[in-house]
Image (spheres, rainbow, N blue to C red):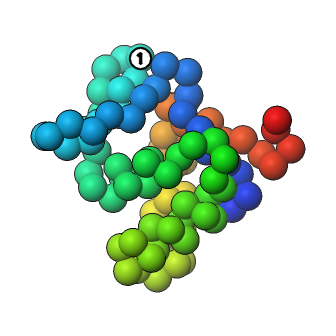
């Protein structure tokens, strides 16, 4: 996954925070999220690139930037595979 790609939620996908925790609302239902996945998806807005998201999380959770990048890549790849997240390139307008 390129660090310059900008993730955005797929059609019909929304992030929701409730007292019981965060969840991803998807066309087929819901996915419960752990705190780190919720923090990463809070940063998904179609404007921030993967590198920016990983850097912000590395600072927030006090982890090595490389580790944060690996975790962000893995999360976004799983969600992109199911079309819950779409990856936009720099040239997408």
Q: Is residue 25 above or below residue 17?
A: above
Residue 57 at what x, y percent from top left? 45, 67
Count of numbered circles in the view: 1
Taking the image as drawn, is residue 73 in sight? yes
Taking the image as drawn, is residue 70 in sight? no
Disc 1 crowd, CA 10 A, few/some/many (<14, 14-19, 20+): few
Q: Is residue 16 above or below residue 75?
A: above
Which of the image's four quarters has the N terminus?
Answer: bottom right
Residue 55, quarter of picture? bottom right
Instruction: Tell me what residue is drawn at x 31 percent, y 20 percent.
Output: 29
Which residue is more in the foreground, 79 or 88? 88
Which of the image's four quarters has the C terminus?
Answer: top right
Determine whether the residue tagged by mark 1 lies in a helix, strand or loop: loop
Residue 92 at what x, y percent from top left? 82, 38
Residue 42 at what x, y percent from top left? 43, 48
Instruction: Tell me what residue is drawn at x 81 percent, y 49 percent.
Output: 90
Which residue is more in the foreground, 85 or 49? 49
State the residue position of label 1: 27
Instruction: Tell me what residue is drawn at x 46 percent, y 74 percent.
Output: 58
Q: Is residue 46 left or right of residue 75?
A: right
Q: Is residue 22 left or right of residue 68?
A: left
Which residue is more in the foreground, 50 or 71? 50
Which residue is more in the foreground, 73 or 20? 20
Instruction: Tell me what residue is drawn at x 63 percent, y 53 percent.
Output: 48
Furthest residue in direction right, as rendered: 91
Residue 16 at what x, y percent from top left? 32, 34
Q: Is residue 49 above or below residue 26?
A: below
Q: Is residue 30 above or below residue 88?
A: above
Furthest residue in direction left, as rendered: 20
Q: Is residue 59 left or right of residue 5?
A: left
């Amino acid at each position: 996954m390129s660090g310059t790609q900008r993730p955005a939620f797929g059609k019909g996908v929304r992030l929701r925070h409730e007292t019981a925790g965060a969840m991803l609302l998807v066309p087929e239902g819901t996915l419960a999220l752990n705190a780190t996945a919720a923090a990463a998806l809070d940063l998904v807005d179609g404007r921030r690139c993967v590198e920016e998201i990983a850097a912000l999380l590395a600072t927030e959770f006090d982890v090595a930037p490389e580790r944060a990048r690996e975790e962000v890549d893995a999360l976004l790849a799983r969600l992109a595979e199911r079309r819950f997240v779409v990856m936009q390139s720099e040239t997408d307008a």
